[in-house]
Amino acid sequence: MLFWIICLFVSLVLGAPSGFKDLPRLWSSRTLYCGRDSLHFTLPANHSEIIHFLTVRDSEGQSHPLDRSACVSISQKPEGSTVVIVPYTGCFFIKKNSYFLMTLRIEGLESVSKVLLYEEDLKCPTHLPALDVPSNSVCQGVQRQDRLPCATQPVSQGECEERGCCYTTEDHRVPCYYGNTVTTHCTPDGYFSIAVSRDVTLPSLILDSVHLVSGYGSGCVPVTKNGAFVLYKFPLSSCGTTFLGAGDQGIYANELVAHHDVKNWNTGSLMQDSTFRLHVSCRYSTGSFLPLMVQVFTLPPPPSITQFGPLSLELRIATNQQYSKYYANGDYPVVKLLKDSVFLEVRILQRTDPDLVLVLHECWATPSTNPLQRPQWPILMNRCPYEGDNYQTRFILVGAVSGLQFPSHYQRFVISTFSTASQQALTGPVYFHCSAAACVPSTVESCVAHCPRIRARRSLENQALQDTPRSLVMAEGPVDFQMEKEQENVEQKE
């Protein structure tokens, strides 16, 4: 079965009336996905009436009402949302390069001619990677009381198996569940989802010992656990995830470790390899943020003496410019005015090598924990402050006077202003992300960024640094940027 993958979307809004202004938000990763044979998208209950205004273009450029097209399947869920299924063949998709493409439009009348009000191109790859359908032994070995749901209901057998999960018609409560194996998903909203069965090995795993190698903090623990399974779900830019660019793809990788259960007999104990290591990677298209592939390696080759590995990093927000105190988990979301400064710090954890230098490659902000979500606001690019907008980023020198044991393990920077001249100003809750690597100074690499006063929006980086895997880190919570008037209203209400 093919691994489901989220659709790429490219939108163009041309003077849409007020009733359609929320349309771009509908084509999100939560409402669209590309199946094996068809595109599925869901219109929320409060926007279901839009279905009557949507038209599609055929291969000759002619428009047809979507809801009156014989090849399109339209159904309504009990809560009022509308599900639309459009097959790739025999309908309105055309093949373009390596994609199936369909154009949705909303047209209005002006005098006697039609006027384009809204247009959306939906794309699905023609070739999708596959997840194997679990074998009968993998599925039948899971006791009913141990089953963890693999998908929200309602879910069809085809959709369930596309996720690499087990399906049964005999269990109406949990028809789609994880099998006795390792099941990993790269979710379209920028998360790792990893389900590990106790019985994936013999002897069985000790589930209490399963942990992320470099994942620390409340967001890096299992979200669900029972006597037979443990389920992790965490953002791509947290829990020690590493990033490596490979052409037009970005590879996100992480690693879990567990211990085997010891089998005791009168004559002694049997213990196989004492440590179970699970390496998981997700490939995303860097241009469109499509999850392209998931790979799981339970038996990696022996490590070399010197090798790349995940860094344990922490991104903190200080309460003052002296960096003497930091916001704790319970302080989020931190409320700031757009004119307020934000004091950020990234540090290396659990390393004592004084020669290591922390290098920040890129930092950015997004409206959610998903590091891939658009819009994005660049903060650092190619190790230097981004100067393409009306906010300023300034590095703070961390030297011996800081009193830190390893000053080179820290990077501090201040965002002075976050108002922009563009239509998409940075308001509301935003999450900060950074990609970083450890560097050892040499004659080839000084590990120090040289940033000219006037920077181009993009510049080339040392090729060796580009090829170095980077660890991702995210602040523990969001900063809620508000306009000054909004803040005054809040204070008056209090």
Image: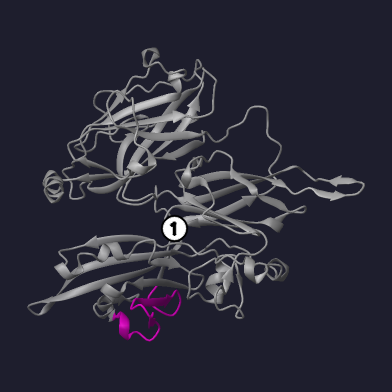
Task: For the N terminus, give its image quadrant.
Answer: bottom right
- Which image quadrant for residue 450? top left
Mark 1 residue element:
loop
- On the image, the x and y values in percent for residue 68 come to 31, 86
Is residue 487 shown left or right of residue 321? Answer: left
Asked if residue 333 can be seen in this view, the reply is yes
Residue at 44% across, 34% down:
314
Where residue 283 sits: x, y (%)?
Answer: 51, 50
Res 231 → quadrant:
bottom right
Q: Residue at x 63, y 65 (%)?
A: 146
Q: Is there any visible trace of residue 61 in the rendered image?
A: no
Q: Residues within 10 Å of mark 1 (few under 14, many from 20)?
A: many
Residue located 70% across and 68% down the image: 135
54 is higher (above) or lower (below) than 208: below
**Image position of 291 with respect to 164: above or below:** above
Tell me what residue is drawn at x 53 percent, y 48 percent: 221
Q: Which one is nearer the viewer's eye here, 415 or 283?
A: 415
Please say whether residue 86 is one of the residues in the magenta stretch. yes
Residue in the foreground of this view, choosing between 249 and 145: 145
In magenta, the rendered stretch is 65-93
According to the picture, the residue beneath numbered tag 1 turns out to be 188
- 138 left or right of 319? right
Residue farthest left in this picture: 111
Q: Position of residue 337 (x, y in %)?
A: 19, 40
Tell whether position 177 is magenta: no
> From what the image shows, is residue 194 above or below residue 386?
below
The part of the image, by quadrant, that contains residue 358 is top left
Left or right of 60, for residue 242: right
**Amino acid type of the residue tagged 1 in the rendering:** Pro
Between 296 and 463, the one lying in front of the other is 296
* x and y, in percent, of residue 381 in the image: 34, 34
